[in-house]
Image (cartoon, rainbow, N blue to C red):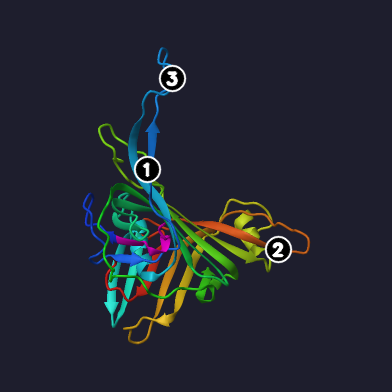
Amino acid sequence: MGYSSQSGQVGFKTQAGLGTYATPATTGVFVRLRGGSLGINRDLLVPDPEIGGGRDTSDAYLGAAVWSGDYEFYARMEMLSCLLKACLGSAATATVTGVSTHTITPLDSATLPYLSVEERIGSALETYNYTDAVVNTLHLESDANGYLMATAGLIAAKQIAGATATASPTIKDETPLYVGTNITVTYNAVSVPAKSFSLDINNNFEDDDFRLGSFFVGDLTAKAREVTASFTIRHQDSALWRQAAYGVPAATGVGGITTKNQLVITITSYEDIPASSPLTKYSLTITIPKFIYEPFAFEPSGDDYLENDVSGRALRPAIATPLMTSVIKAGNTAIA
């Protein structure tokens, strides 16, 4: 008799501070996943061969431990609000007539919110509690004829096995899914005819800051933040290539000036938020005030249409202006 992966469960809850587990059973959120879990990263410390010690290994010990992994899921807004807050750092919520607007922006501080995670593997194989988990990476993507999908890469400082799983969680994100037909992209207020898009946020945490006298990582502090996006675009003219390669759309040769404009990605549901008045759709709007395309080359091939995966990155407009702003409209009055 084996264990089915589908009967597991995963819940998240933002911690009040470092070092204290916050059970997702109370004001957390349990989510649906396509797959993934946090796994232990730990070395078996095997000594080198010693003169006079014979040809066989005589002993070995276990080293320090840290836990990391990726969760893959169809994006839903209550889960995304929790993960985006943990990934970026700052959130403000306003609720009016059944619609909660969560405005999430990046913190300049390198210390980001910590999450507690409850992870049940299978129906009863094992249940873990993770404390001091951080969201290192967050990836969103969708094709024109597909679902909005996401991957969150977490790192956790501590784990306890044999925990008691929350029985029949009531706080679940069962809000709608999102598809490419309800996703739009604009650049400099002009619609981008993208066939697909992806967005990546990377906090570049180091997960090997081990200290003498401890099994656990000593610190989880974010390094340089990177926000990038890419789009599959079938070319209608050469202006985009000139902008990316030469710096400005009208240029006919290389130059030093570059073009940076506002990028807006808008994701909307078909369904309304149940208690909203007037009726309002679930939505996520990502605004990057200053986005620059990276150089690329045309790639002709046979009778194929000319199209490229065009990438770019977010730049900080000014100290007083956030690198990006994410606005979520949903029904949850507080972020888990």
**Numbered disc in front, either 2 or 1:** 1
Left-right relation of 288 to 102: right
Q: Pointer 1: residues within 10 angstroms few (<14), some, or many (20+)?
A: many
Residue 72 rendering spot, x and y as whole percentages: 45, 60
Secondary structure beneath dot 3 equals loop
- What amino acid type should be assigned to the residue bearing mark 2? Leu
- Circle 3 residue: 49
Contact, mark 3 vs mark 1 (Cβ under 8 Å): no
Task: Return the residue nearer the eye: 174 or 190.
Answer: 174
Specify the label residue 32 is tagged with: none
Q: In the rendered view, tell whether residue 189 sits above or below residue 222.
A: below
- Circle 1 residue: 207
Task: Return the residue nearer the eye: 177 or 96.
Answer: 177
Residue at the farthest top position: 52
Secondary structure beneath dot 1 equals loop
Magenta span contains residue 151: no
Magenta span contains residue 3: yes
Left-right relation of 315 to 305: left
Which residues make up the magenta segment? 1-12
Looking at marks 3 and 2 on the same chain, the residue that comes earlier in the sequence is marked by: 3
Q: Could you tell me which residue is drawn at 29 percent across and 34 percent down?
A: 211
